[in-house]
Image (spheres, rainbow, N blue to C red):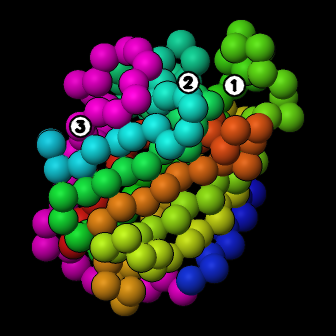
Amino acid sequence: MALHLTILALSAVAGASSSLLENFGSLGTGSYSSFSAFGGHATFSAYGAGSILADPGSLPPRSNPNAIFGNGAAVVITFDQTWNHITGYFRVPSFEMLASSKRTISSNPTFAVVEFYRNGSQVGLSVYSIVKDDRYTIFDWDLAEEGGFDSMVILGNGGNGDLIGMDDMTVSS
């Protein structure tokens, strides 16, 4: 059972007028400090000393060929416009991935902390429980009542605030 604690009241979705999908299908396997996504309308950046890793062997994707996750870093997503709604899937890496990267089981996160910003000011915060049995957990946030968001920071509660896997993300207005 996934527990979702929302610190800021998030409203129900009213019809979306436009949307963008990112499934990391054009992203090659590897380690990145940043990369363009959502058809060039967003930048994913590593926040911290690590990187963003696209590695289907470490984190099997929900949609092939890749999912991504912070590897020693949180993930910052910066959009070129304001969006009201975002959905997608979170997952934590398998215990085998942690062992191969010499991390301890205790560094595997059990929840994601997602901070939403607009024009540099925080407009929302959500704490989201993640199932640890190799399944993806859907996330779905609407910040229309808060005026939308143009960037977000995704942190895990593991050792480095990282290891939150993401795939099949959609933003809409």
Q: Residue at x 25, y 57 (%)?
A: 79
The answer to whether residue 133 is magenta is no
Image position, residue 5 (x, y; %):
68, 72
Q: Is residue 135 left or right of residue 10?
A: right
Tell whether label 1 touches label 3 (CB within 8 Å).
no
Q: Is residue 63 left or right of residue 133?
A: left
Image quarter in which the N terminus is found? bottom right
Q: Which secondary structure is most common in the magenta stretch?
A: loop
Kindly identify which residue carries mark 2.
Answer: 59
Tell whether label 1 touches label 2 (CB within 8 Å).
yes
Three-letter amino acid code of the residue under disc 1: Ser
Q: Residue at x 55, y 61 (%)?
A: 114
Three-letter amino acid code of the residue under disc 2: Leu
- Residue 106 vs 6, above or below: the answer is above
Three-letter amino acid code of the residue under disc 3: Ser
Tell me how far mark 3 sits from mark 1, CA to CA: 26 Å
Image position, residue 173 (x, y; %):
21, 72
Image position, residue 126 (x, y; %):
59, 69
Q: Relative to the observer, which residue lies in front, 96 or 161?
A: 161
SS for callout 3: strand
SS for callout 2: loop
Q: Relative to the observer, which residue lies in front, 162 or 56?
A: 162
Kindly identify which residue carries mark 3.
Answer: 36
Q: Which image quadrant is residue 13 in?
A: bottom left
Q: How many C-alpha atoms fall within 10 Å of the one at disc 1: few (<14), some, or many (≥20)?
A: some
First in residue order: circle 3 vs circle 1: 3
Highlighted range, magenta: 9-38
Tell me how far mark 3 sits from mark 2, CA to CA: 20 Å
